[in-house]
Image: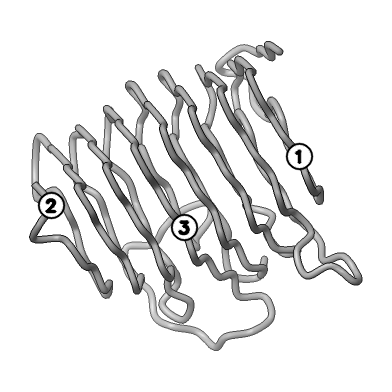
Amino acid sequence: MDIRAPEDSPNTDAIDPSVSRRVRISKCLLDVGDDNVAIKSGKRLPGREFACEDITVTDCTFLHGHGMSIGSETAGGVRNVTVERLTLIGTENGLRIKSSRGKGGRVENIIYRDITMTNVSSAFTIVGYYPKVPKTDVAQPMTAETPAFRNLRFENITATCLKEAGSFVGLPESPLANVVLENVHITAQTGLTLRNAKGVRLNHVEVKVEQGPPFLIQDAEVEGLKASP
């Protein structure tokens, strides 16, 4: 399946699985002006712990667009998502999970593997803030409307980025938890931000940058950093 829209056309998502289960998106070429794929879980469903679950995106090519997204609608929760054998060329974002205070929901058990990104603005945007990450913040009380991301795995990923390598930024009161990057190789203008996160493990992770340090760590527990090239 091919889905196309002008690259400067707003609100032209290609495929948005919304409050759905057991979905497979395969062998698609998506060239649009907004999210190429966006998994959305905007409401809680009675009797279901997760409104979105068991979703696979495989063997697709993304051209213009905002990349492979989960959120920012996360209230109903998202789990058990596998994204594999993906090619992204010139997308604004690469792999993105986005939410914010007030939206709530858990995003967990997400696997990305065997992915190539070329000339994306940023390879990773995994953030508990949307639409913009503040430079500084303080913890707020945990509520039912506080989003939480955990058990995220990134394997066999290569990316060239026009801007930053990416951002993994949780909320101070709800840090990202259990994040694994394995066999990840990125070339970018600036480094990879890891902030408000715990249980981050790096295995054969290489970030080459034109300016600044390859890793920018703030309030994050990171294993394997010294072993990274």
Where residue 196 sits: x, y (%)? 35, 71
Q: Residues within 10 Å of mark 2 (few under 14, many from 20)?
A: few
Reply above or below: 112 against 106.
above
**Residue at x-position 45% and y-position 25%:** 91
Where residue 82 sits: x, y (%)? 57, 44
Q: Nearer the viewer, residue 54 or 213?
A: 54
Q: Identify which amino acid the numbered label 3 is placed on.
A: Leu
Residue 32 relative to residue 182: left or right = right
The residue to which callout 1 is attached is 23
Q: Nearer the viewer, residue 133 or 202?
A: 202
Q: Residues within 10 Å of mark 1 (few under 14, many from 20)?
A: some
Q: Point out the tag, 2 or 1, that comes first from the N-terminus.
A: 1
Q: Point out the tag, 1 or 3, that comes first from the N-terminus.
A: 1
The residue to which callout 3 is attached is 152
What is the quadrant of the N terminus in the image?
top right
Where residue 104 sits: x, y (%)? 66, 70
**Residue at x-position 59% and y-position 69%:** 147
Q: Which mark is residue 123?
A: none
Residue 229 relative to residue 179: left or right = left
Where residue 212 sits: x, y (%)? 9, 47
Q: How is the image coloured?
A: one colour
The residue to which callout 2 is attached is 228
**Residue at x-position 42% and y-position 18%:** 89
Q: Quarter of the image holding residue 221?
A: bottom left
Q: Identify which amino acid the numbered label 1 is placed on.
A: Val
Q: Identify which amino acid the numbered label 2 is placed on.
A: Ser
